[in-house]
Amino acid sequence: MKKSIALLITCFLTVSLIAKSKASFVLFKETPNKTICIKHPDANKPTFFAEVKTLYFEVYKPDTKADIVNIVDKLSKDPQVQSCNVGKQTGDYYAIQLILKKPADKNWFITNFKALGLKTIKLNNAEVTEVDKL
């Protein structure tokens, strides 16, 4: 009986702490449309975006092929971008090659991805997460 009460109190306190926490948790059971997918051995490193000058990434299930062209056009106009090109389509994945004039910080990528309507990202085999959580 004492163990049951202790367990109940522990569960209550845990739920209370989670409810009071300002952290938000989003779990994606399926990969959402317009998710950025990056497959690179160093993509999970905290310094990856600050070190990369050439980035190959894919957009999973854009609404239309015109969305990919729009993404490339907008990125190409950024002063930090040397070039941006549409790559190969493989099933529901559309490849993009982005070459920067010099490496940019993670915030540059977050800001640009969000402005392009790309709100979720998957790095290698990690779970899909919000771009803001990079």
Image: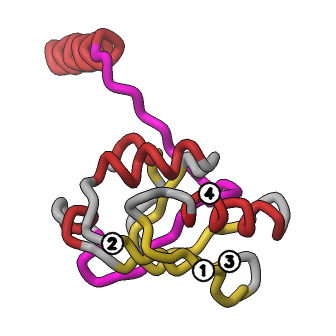
Please determine whether, in this image, residue 71 is positioned above or below residue 5. Answer: below
Q: Amino acid at mark 4?
A: Lys
User: Going from the N terminus, do you reach mark 1 or mark 2 first?
Assistant: 1
Q: Earlier in the sequence, mark 4 or mark 1?
A: 4
Residue at which label 2 appears: 101
Residue 2: percent from left, percent from top: 15, 13
**Marks 1 and 2, how far apart in space?**
15 Å
Task: Tell me if mark 1 has few (under 14), some (14-19) or many (20+) residues whose alpha carbon lies within 10 angstroms of its own.
Answer: some
Q: Which residue is mark 4?
A: 74
What crowding class fits label 4: few (fewer than 14 Cα within 10 Å), some (14-19), or many (20 or more)? some
Query: On the picture, is 112 further left or further right than 108?
Result: right
The image quarter in which residue 8 lies:
top left
Residue identified by numbered label 1: 85
Residue type pointed to by label 3 = Tyr
Nearest to the observer: residue 127 or residue 119: 119
Q: Residue 93, which numbered label? A: 3
Of the two numbered discs 2 and 3 on the same chain, state the one appearing first in sequence: 3
**Mark 3 or mark 4, earlier in chain:** 4
Q: CA distance from mark 4 to mark 1?
A: 11 Å
Magenta part of the chain:
21-43
Quarter where residue 59 is shown:
bottom right
Q: Indicate the quadrant where residue 38 lies.
A: bottom left
User: Residue at the location (62% across, 57% down)?
Assistant: 74
Would you say the magenta stretch is mainly helix, strand or loop? Answer: loop
